[in-house]
Amino acid sequence: MKKIISYILISIPFFIQAQSLSIQQLWENANQNLIYQQNQLQIQIEQQELLEIKSNRIPIFYIDANLQRNLIIPTTPVPAIAFDPNAQEGAIIPLRFATKWSSKAGVQVEWTLFDPKRRVEEKQKELEIQKSEIEQKLTLQNWKKDATLAYASIVFATEQYNLMQENTKIYDELVAINKERYAAGREQSATYIAAQQELERHNIQVYEAWAVLQDADLELRRYTNLDTILNVSSNFEEIITNLKNDDLTNYDIARLEIDKNISELQLASVKRQLLPTLSLNGYWGQQYFSNELKLARKEEWFGNSFVNMALRIPVSGYFTSQPTIRKIALNSDLIDKQIQDIARNENIDDSQKKLKLDAAERKIESFRKIEILAQQNKEEQYEAYKAGRILLTELNQSLITYKKAKQDVWQAQFEMLKLLIE
């Protein structure tokens, strides 16, 4: 039967049905993490940015319209001979080249037919989305590590608290026994006083253990909502079993591989910038010129339409791009070296971790045997003291030894848990 660890929360409203929380249920709450939600929104933003880039393939149509009132009619001097063949040599006349009112209305289209950087930009944004998704997985992994340690701290603190209560109960009984013996004249006053002092010391330890448990409670609340949780239901053995079956992938190499792909795309982008850009612009509309604002007069509207093709060739790029190309190539080589270094160290770390886990398992097994023997000794010494065959100091020593044996087991389990998480 699975062990249920009592864990009392700071406060639970009486009208809320209390529940227990297992380690698996805790992990399932990862999507409630605010950092996770922020990363999720960042991924969605980058996905929309990708759609923005792809939308640039579509021609841009827009309506262009304006109405202008010229307060001072623009005037420029022109040679008089252009209008009067008989004009004197060098004579000029002022020429107004606008009316009081003018207007323009039409539809314009702009379309980039070929942009050599567009496809590269799309690919780079797709890789950035992949990198954000990996960052999301890394965030979940780190959250799970921290949340698991917080959960395990509650298990540890609860075990400590329960042990302190158990020992205090024993000393309550010892004080009662010594009181009866002292009243009957079969026990010295010093022994009775020593029993009472030990009881108070254990009461202090209970208060301290309770404070540690409440601190662990608050720490776990950083990772999940505990308002309806009465106790945690997974012990160290269950947590360790789940961790052994959990995916603890190292995402460092995956991130670097995406960085390398982005670097290669940047290199392709620099090279593509040397290619020409071809764009189409077109306008269909009319212009209005009149000294009176009467837009309904069709005879004062004049057609104004055009279509042009623009070719842009980046000539200077052929001379300025070489340092950038070399820099990107060197950065790609650097990433390769980093991947090799991480892969080599990861293999060594895995081997070291396996050795440490084997040692930790043997350590736990030995500590459990010591705990069983310490418990047996404690029970025998307790019965011997009640029968009056040993001194209180001998019983105290057996209780201290048992407490140390229990703590050694919990500490070894906690250390093994941390090894699995690393």
Image (tube, grey):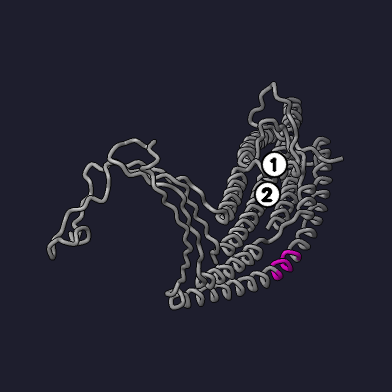
Instruction: Give neighbour class at mark 2: few <14, some 14-19, many 20+ (Cα, 10 Å).
Output: many
Q: Earlier in the sequence, mark 1 or mark 2?
A: 1
Instruction: Give neighbour class at mark 1: few <14, some 14-19, many 20+ (Cα, 10 Å).
Output: few
Which residue lies under the disc numbered 2?
A: 144
**Residue 209 visible in the snapshot:** no
Q: Residue furthest top?
A: 15
Quadrant of residue 28 within the rendered picture: top right
Q: Position of residue 258 (x, y in %)?
A: 62, 64
- At a point 38% along the width and 46% down the height, the residue shown is 287
The amino acid marked with disc number 2 is: Lys
237, 392: nearer the viewer:
237
Which residue lies under the disc numbered 1?
A: 29
Horizontal placement of 59 versus 151: left or right? left
Q: Report how far apart the C-alphas of labels 1 and 2 lie in the structure.
A: 10 Å
The amino acid marked with disc number 1 is: Asn
41, 138: nearer the viewer:
41
Q: Which residues are magenta?
A: 347-354
Q: Position of residue 145 (x, y in %)?
A: 67, 51
Quadrant of residue 422 within the rendered picture: bottom right
Q: Position of residue 219 (x, y in %)?
A: 61, 41
Horizontal placement of 104 versus 379: left or right? left
- At a point 71% along the width and 45% down the height, the residue shown is 27
**Residue 183 visible in the snapshot:** yes
Whether residue 260 is situated above or below residue 409 in the rendered picture: below
Whether residue 89 is situated above or below residue 286 in the rendered picture: below
Q: Is residue 349 magenta?
A: yes
